[in-house]
Amino acid sequence: MRSIAIVVFILLTFNICQSQMRENFFEGSGFSLMPSINYITSSSIQLNSNSNNIIEQNITEELKGGIGYGIALRKRFGEDLILGISTQYIKIIL
């Protein structure tokens, strides 16, 4: 558990440092590749979201947390235009 806390701390520190360096992030080829990690504390699923009955719409299933990983690829086109694509994998524990 302690090793997970250390990894999360390092990743959060890395993200804070990255936010301070964003101006130089696209130097060279104009591409940016940014990994990410997310910790989900809890979540819920609305089981009957399309139901006409308001009581059925509000029925939810509570889930535990999980961990998600992701990566984003961005390309800068000029000073004011950046296009990007990203993907994420999230595993939620029931």
Image (tube, rainbow, N blue to C red):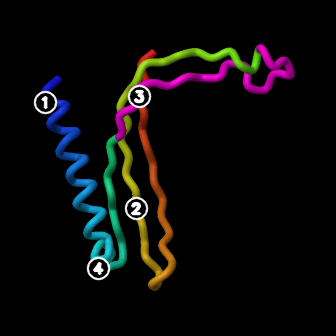
Tell me the mark number nearer the camera, choosing from 1 and 2.
Answer: 1
Circle 2 packing at 10 Å, graded few (<14), some (14-19), many (20+), is some
Mark 2 / mark 3, whichever is N-terminal: 2
Mark 2 / mark 4, whichever is N-terminal: 4
**Quadrant into which the N terminus falls:** top left
Residue at the (40%, 31%) spot, across then down? 40
Residue at the (23%, 46%) spot, across then down? 11
Please indicate whether residue 89 sits to the left or right of residue 12 in the image.
right
**Residue tagged by mark 3?**
91
Circle 1 packing at 10 Å, graded few (<14), some (14-19), many (20+), is few
**Residue tagged by mark 2?**
73
**Residue tagged by mark 1?**
3
- SS at badge 3: strand
The residue lying furthest to the bottom in this view is: 78
Segment tinted magenta in the rendering = 38-55
Q: Distance between the residues labelled 3 and 1?
A: 19 Å
Please indicate whether residue 71 sits to the left or right of residue 43 in the image.
left
Determine whether 57 is above or below 19 in the image.
Answer: above
Label 3 with label 1: CB-CB less than 8 Å: no
